[in-house]
Image (cartoon, rainbow, N blue to C red):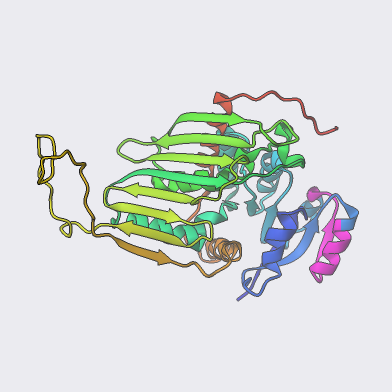
Amino acid sequence: MKKLRTAIIGQGRSGRNIHGRFFLSKGNAFAEVIAVVDFDPERRERALQEYPGCEVYADYRELFQRDDLDLVVNTTFSDLHYSVTKDLLGHGFNVVVEKPMARSYYECSDLIRTAKEKGVLLAVFQQTMLAPFYTNARDAVKSGKLGKIRQISIRYNGFSRRWDWQTMQCRLGGSLYNTGPHPVSFALDMLDFDPETQLVYSKLSVEQTSGDADDYAKLILTAPGKPVVDVEVSSIDAFKGPIIKVQGSQGTLQLNPDRSYTTKYVIPGENPERPLIREPLKDEDGLPVYCREELQFHEETVENPQYPWDESSRRFYEMVYNKLTADVPMAVTAEMAAQIIRIIETAHAQNPLPVWCNKEG
């Protein structure tokens, strides 16, 4: 199988430690890195050693001289995702752009329109939507085992401080733009990416970060006939709880911190019906009692043995490869990523934060 000839723009934590790490792994049967772009000369020199045979550039626009690239991966600063991706698409490149896709739904729509006009692929690295820990749990929810789903709670929480560029609004930083695309993608997916989904409540604040961008976010979403979804991305939660908790009329699912998931549910008909008693309840001695019974539950735990980020990256790039080589429809589309940004953009519009950082210092 011929691998996609690929360029990576950026050799930071994402470009090197996620995308580059996968491309150098045994699980990669899809892409070969032949070009690397980074403004830092030390990173360019390191790339020459880490990606044998690649060429390095200081400016992504130097790639425009090449006609042998099948794919370009854009892992620039978040505030550059839109402009750099727009330029690449305009020059006829297939592009994978890191999340967040862009700052606004308008920018996302503009990228989608440009890709269609140029006849090229635009893919957004929302890889956790393909991670086994999530897809297995989602399938269990969709199976009907839990009955009618009423509430879904999603937590990407911890207790920590940050002081890097990801804490700056001018860099499109903050927890919601940086980490938020993962839990918001789960929320929208659980709502079937319903176009009528609304953000009915949001709260953003700055608590521990050294910059001016949010590190606490609370969102509540719903759609007609769909459950309520409660999303948190918090840096002030010192207790590890479930990543996802789904409450249904017949039971509950928890996606645990170790990324196993547990379901606890009842089976209709196994617990006798309880007819309504209108008079106060009392025992055989006439003393008042509370409604209490021991329901027959079933409980199952499913482990997810794969390291989630390796497998989710593999599934993502397999999807991109199949699209480019056999025109197989994408499971995670740019249109989905645009809906994620629509929610995040709305939360920021509802909660404007003071801006005091700048790129110069």
Q: Which residues are magenta?
A: 43-61
Q: Is residue 29 above or below residue 187?
A: below
Residue farthest front in this picture: 285
Viewer-nearest residue: 234 or 348: 234
Q: Is any part of residue 69 visible from this angle? A: no
Provide residue 57's location: percent of width, then percent of height: 84, 55
Q: Position of residue 41 (x, y in %)?
A: 90, 54
Q: Can you give x and y, in whole percent of width and height, for residue 295 in the image?
A: 23, 55
Asked if residue 35 lies left or right of residue 255, the reply is right
Residue 335 coordinates in the image, percent (x, y): 50, 44
Residue closer to the observer: 298 or 305: 298
Residue ID at (20%, 43%): 291
**In the image, what residue occupies the spot 63% across and 35% down?**
103
Using the rendered view, name the quadrant where residue 33 is placed.
bottom right
Observer-nearest residue: 54 or 254? 254
289 in magenta: no
Q: Quadrant of the C terminus?
A: top right
Image quadrant holding the N terminus, namely bottom right
Is residue 56 visible in the rendered structure shown here? yes
Say if the magenta span includes residue 44.
Answer: yes
* Side of 229 where 69 appears, left or right: right
At x 31%, y 53%, the residue is 251
Which sits in the foreground, 288 or 19? 288
State the residue at coordinates (63%, 71%).
28
Q: How many marks?
A: 0
Rendered view: 358 above or below 332: above
